[in-house]
Image: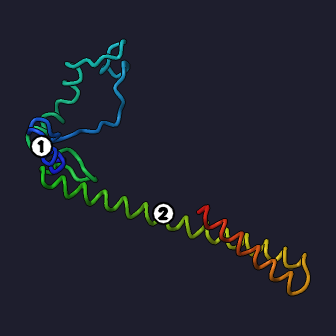
Amino acid sequence: VNTIGRAAKLKGFEIVKDIHLHHELFSVDNGILTPTFKLKRNDAKRVFQPQIDAMYSGKIGVVGGVAGLKQGEVESKVEEVVTSSISKAETAVASSAKSAEKSVESSVMAAATSAGGAVAGSSGEKAAGRAASSAMAAAESRI
């Protein structure tokens, strides 16, 4: 955020320093909003005072399960958590793609076998082979 802000020539007060993500939506029921959905500033400040104090003291809440990190530590911890999440997502996508490819291959082979049995002779086998190749190319373009 700092790098982007500096590149955009933002002033110091225009760059976000800290942020707190809260698990619960603001609502009338939890006393943070009025019945007309306006923020009750004093009540919100009272509820979030510990997080506000932590932000101004230079300490951040929890990132990736680690509490009490300072500004420089937060960036490296966020990078670590994001890199780990991306790696897990890439592994899941690769696994799904392999599974889909195997399913397509077995379907194409079954179709080719069926087509080969329906048409006799070497010309029939060639036709079945072409049909299988065509079906495989069409299936791969969908993956």
Q: CA distance from mark 1 to mark 2?
A: 40 Å
> Which of the two marks, 1 or 2, is nearer to us in this view?
1
What residue do we see at 56% from left, 70% from top?
98
* Residue 10 location, quadrant: top left
Residue 50 image offset from top left, x and y in percent: 17, 34
Does residue 10 appear left or right of residue 78 in this picture?
left
Helix, strand or loop for disc 1: loop
| Disc number placed over residue 92 in the picture, else none | 2
Q: Residues within 10 Å of mark 2 (few under 14, many from 20)?
A: few
Does residue 21 lie above or below 84 as drawn?
above
What residue do we see at 37% from left, 60% from top?
86
Q: Looking at this view, is 140 or 134 the one in front?
A: 134
What residue do we see at 35% from left, 17% from top?
37
Residue 81 image offset from top left, x and y in percent: 29, 57
Helix, strand or loop for disc 2: helix
| Disc number placed over residue 9 in the picture, else none | 1
Q: Residues within 10 Å of mark 1 (few under 14, many from 20)?
A: few
User: Which amino acid type corresponds to the residue marked 2 in the rendered image?
Assistant: Ala
The C terminus is located in which quarter? Answer: bottom right
- Mark nearer the N terminus (1 vs 2): 1
- How is the structure coloured here? rainbow
User: Which amino acid type corresponds to the residue marked 1 in the rendered image?
Assistant: Lys
